Image: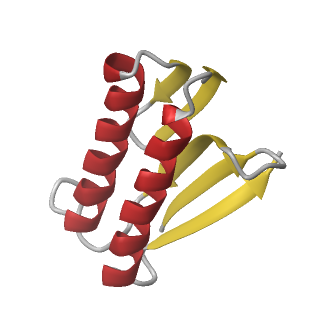
Amino acid sequence: MINAQFYEDHEHKLLGFHISGHSDLAMMGEDVCCAAVSSAVMMTCNTITEVFKINAKVSDDGNDIMLKFISDDSGEGDKMLVGLMIQLGQIERQYPGNIKISVETR
């Protein structure tokens, strides 16, 4: 199962995420659920760091990706993460049991 954990502050502003696992829908390299999640996550990370130039720490070891804002004065990072959460929710509805989304307050 893919675990997508988002982190928010006490004002419900998203601060980052940690996504790991495999959907087990099909073999690696042939799994459309994993491909959809990977594509959405990478587009989000690239837009945050390369387009909006938001200072964020990103780590990716292939099966485990994490993004944490160092600073986001614009508020655009939060909006991007809300969009990612919505997209992952759509994938979760299409592939129930293959992805789990959670939010933790920090």
Residue at screen point 46% across, 82% down: 97
Residue at screen point 62% across, 21% down: 73
Left/right of residue 90 with respect to residue 60 in the rendered view: left
Residue 96's quadrant in the figure?
bottom left
Residue at screen point 40% across, 60% down: 22
Residue at screen point 39% across, 22% down: 52
Left/right of residue 2 with respect to residue 11 in the rendered view: left
Q: How many marks?
A: 0
Compared to 15, does 8 lie above or below?
Answer: below
What quarter of the picture does the C terminus occupy?
top right
Compared to 19, does 22 lie above or below?
Answer: below
Location of residue 85 in the rendering, given as x and y in whole percent from the top left corner: 48, 59
Instruction: Give the colouring mode of the picture.
Output: secondary structure
Between 23 and 14, the residue placed more toward the observer is: 14
Between 4 and 16, the residue placed more toward the observer is: 16
Location of residue 71 in the rendering, given as x and y in whole percent from the top left corner: 64, 19
Residue 95's quadrant in the figure?
bottom left
User: Which residue reaches farthest front?
Assistant: 74
Compared to 1, does 40 lie above or below?
Answer: above
Left/right of residue 35 with respect to residue 66 in the rendered view: left
User: Which residue reaches farthest left?
Assistant: 30
Location of residue 69 in the rendering, given as x and y in whole percent from the top left corner: 61, 26
Location of residue 21 in the rendering, given as x and y in whole percent from the top left corner: 47, 56
